Amino acid sequence: MTTTHAIASRDNPLLKELRKLAQGNTAYRKTGRFWVEGDHLCRAAIVRGLHPEIAVFAHSFWPQASTQLTSAASKNVVVPDALFDEISALESPAKVGFVLDLPADGAMDPHAPTVILDRVQDAGNVGSILRSAAAFGFKQVLALQETAALWSPKVLRAGMGAHFGLQMVEGLEEAQLLALKVPLVVTSSHQGGLIQDLTLPFPCAWVMGHEGQGVRSSLLDRAQFNVRIGQPGGEESLNVAAAAAICLHASAVGVG
């Protein structure tokens, strides 16, 4: 049964925690739960079968909130709009948010279609890659150390709900990737066969590298496939998120 509570003090302990979750990149690691904001992300969580611990509504939004949102959590909290705005990190706060438990750390699946993030540091890029992974049937995302925090608010917003359909493990060391049993595939601007000329494996593990430095040399050396994306327009390189979308689509063509 869902209970509803009104909170009007900005010094309330829950609101203090929510501000940290909504505005801090790694606060979720300490609390074991994370914050999603906005109708789209909240509904995406519900569709995937997630049950938020707490749903938070701005006072002005509460009367018009759908039953799907108001019945999702065991506890609803209604706060003045000004306090919701203080929680939110958005320029235009979305007036509704969920607090969800962080998924338990799962074991790496050696055989799963995988995306490996090698020090990809921009939150927008990471979120976009997660969306492509989910869209093209890559079930697992493995983030090496120095990659942007996967459950940070900015990555969650850029992922647009992709998090809820992926198995993700972060903070890995390169040696742990030796457990993978699928072919390792890397992309480079300067070497490898053109992607449209290759028969790519599926499942496989695509490695997406640092925005400036690319994939580390040790992973390049271990890769079974080295792929180049042709750029007839003459640009030196592609944004890593754009490259990931091209690569993952090409690898998954004909699979589903």
Image: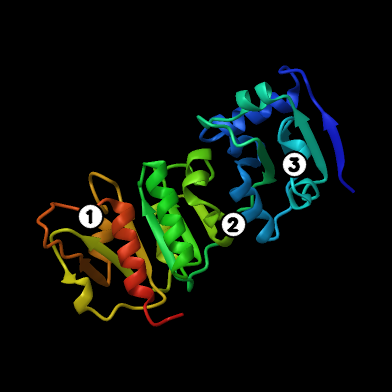
The residue drawn where x is 46% and y is 80% is 256
The residue drawn where x is 46% and y is 66% is 135
Judge depth for marks 2 and 1 and give the one in front.
2
The residue drawn where x is 39% and y is 58% is 116
Q: CA distance from mark 2 to mark 1?
A: 32 Å
To which residue does mark 1 refer?
Answer: 217
To which residue does mark 2 refer?
Answer: 164
Q: Are marks 1 and 3 in contact (CB under 8 Å)?
A: no
Task: Judge whether residue 147 can be spotted in this image.
Answer: no
Give the mark nearer the N terminus: 1 vs 3: 3
To which residue does mark 3 refer?
Answer: 64
Could you tell me which secondary element the residue under label 2 belongs to? Answer: helix
Task: Judge whether residue 233 can be spotted in this image.
Answer: yes
Question: Residue 195 location, x and y as percent?
Answer: 22, 72
Give the mark nearer the N terminus: 2 vs 3: 3
Question: Residue 244 location, x and y as percent?
Answer: 33, 60
* Amino acid at circle 2: Phe
